[in-house]
Amino acid sequence: MCKKEKYIIEECRHCGNKTKLDIVGEYTQCSDEYADMDWQQNWLLLKCCVCNEISLGYKYCGQDTAYFKNNEVVYAEEYTHCFPVETYNGFHVPDNIHNAFLAALKAKYNDNMVCILALRRTIEMICKDQNETKGNLKTKIKSLAKKNVFPSTIYNASDILRILGNKSAHGDDVEYDNNTVNEMIKFTQIIIEYVYVIPYRIDRIKKRLQIK
């Protein structure tokens, strides 16, 4: 179902350039005959033509990504980047929030403190997108928790990001190691997926299975 190319055009998470990533290795997984639906996932080992660093990602397509065009079935491909930074694919996420998160990922390779600040900014933008514009970030996060937009786990993750971001912004004498920054990136990814991606996927499968 998925087209096989010798390269893809995507952002390299090493150098931050959107460029040609040569496919230097590939492994294909497919649904079996007993699966509820047909799907195909191509794992791609990629080499950036700018910085020559290696990345890992995959292309997915299946019956759940199919749509009709000119009376023919087209299988849309969804690309997900897995390494060096495991992240979301960006589908059905507001552009400004998607771009803010990508900016934070790029910052990680230059300055951990700047990355934390950028992640805090992403959380602030999510609050604004959810119509929370009054008060400081702590107030906004609490308000979303009361509305259950942020359940307790998401609230706690958001508050940690807020606290670390505040320390970075105020010039406190702190340093964050790569493990801490990677955890904060994962927290932000989970928050984005909970607020935007999971509701879309739930709605899509309910429509496909005709569940009301």
Image (cartoon, helix red, strand yellow):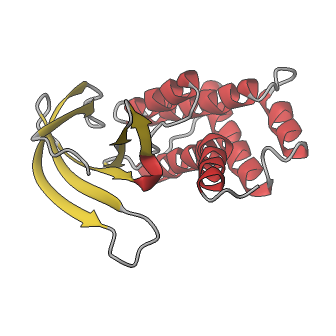
Q: Residue at x 30, y 57 (%)?
A: 41
Does residue 76 show up?
no
Q: Residue at x 78, y 46 (%)?
A: 150
The C terminus lies in quadrant: bottom right
Residue 21's spot in the image, x, y percent?
16, 36
**201 lies left or right of 152:** left
Residue 170's spot in the image, x, y percent?
65, 25
Name of the residue lying farthest toward the bottom = 34
Count the marks: 0
Residue 98's spot in the image, x, y percent?
51, 29
Does residue 19 show up?
yes
Name of the residue lying farthest toward the front = 71
**198 lies left or right of 68:** right
Q: Residue at x 49, y 45 (%)?
A: 181
**77 lies left or right of 128:** left
**15 lies left or right of 205:** left
In the image, is residue 17 above or below residue 27? above
In the image, is residue 164 above or below residue 171? below
**Between 35 and 55, the one nearer to me in the picture:** 35
Q: Residue at x 49, y 25 (%)?
A: 99
